[in-house]
Amino acid sequence: LNPLNSNDVASAYAVADDDGDGFLNVYELNHATDRGNSNSTPVSTLFVDCAAPGPGDGSSTNPFNTVQAALDAAIPYEIIEVADGECAGVGNRDLDFHGKPLMLIAGGSHGWVLNCENAGRGFDFHAGEDARTILRGVTIRNGWATAGAGIRSLGCSPVLESLVIESCRAGQSGGGVYLSGGHPGPVLKNCVLRGNTASTSGGGASFYGPSRLINCTVLDSDAGGLEVNFG
């Protein structure tokens, strides 16, 4: 396996987590940690604190003050850590990984909130992101979009883990999430979708293709709650 070769994503070895520490083998290899030892884990390489004065350089002592700044600056297999607190405004909505394999994780014990202020969606996966792209530990709130107000994924397969998606509104379908296409498809794991709405269908979530839901809860959503078309 060459972890820097995008062709290796098909390898089950690359996207396995041999020691169960929450970091894929491909991240352990890139960060020179022991993929067989759960006490040997990669450390974060870029930092975001939306309360910082900014703009910052992404270091722990001078963090970026928007999430998109970190996503733009990151190189493949970086681990971006976001401090507890609320992120809102330009640079903190319609967030784009640009097709890069990255981990975006919570840095504190309380997690962070992405408040889209009804001015855009939370995250947009549309550039071939796959199972090496991991979003973990964020609450996405007050998203708005035609489809996928919290998260939209088109032809991609990111791993979406330990998320709360709430109070998001879609003009058509997929108030919380809209997942379409991709192989093997997105994974939604240990997530709560609550209070999301859509005008047409899938107030909680719309699935148009293969997706996996693992231990997720959908609450208080309208337009049918879940819309599953195929896959």
Image: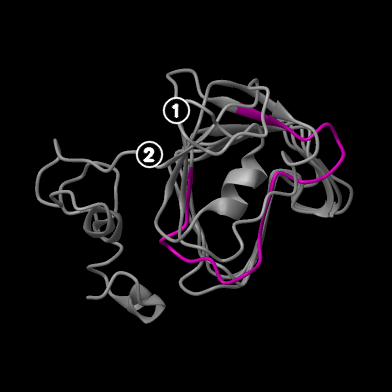
Residue 98 is left or right of residue 203, and the answer is left
Q: Nearer the viewer, mark 2 or mark 1?
A: 2
The answer to the question of whether label 2 and label 1 lie on touching residues, with beta carbons closer than 8 A, is yes
Q: Which residue is mark 1?
A: 107
Tell me which label, 2 or 1, sits earlier in the chain.
Answer: 2
> How far from the left and from the top, in percent, is residue 137?
49, 34
> Residue at 33% of width from left, 77% of height from top?
8
If the image is split into quadrants, where does the N terminus sit? bottom left
Q: Which residue is mark 2?
A: 44
Q: On the image, which quarter does residue 15 sit in?
A: bottom left
In the rendered image, residue 127 lying in the magenta stretch gets the answer yes
Residue 133 appears in the figure: yes
The range drawn in magenta is 113-135
State the SS at label 2: loop
Residue 224 is left or right of residue 58, and the answer is right
> Residue at 78% of width from left, 35% of height from top?
116
> Residue at 53% of width from left, 28% of height from top?
62
Residue 194 appears in the figure: no
The front one of 52 and 115 is: 52
Residue 229 is left or right of residue 26, and the answer is right
Magenta residues, dominant SS class: loop
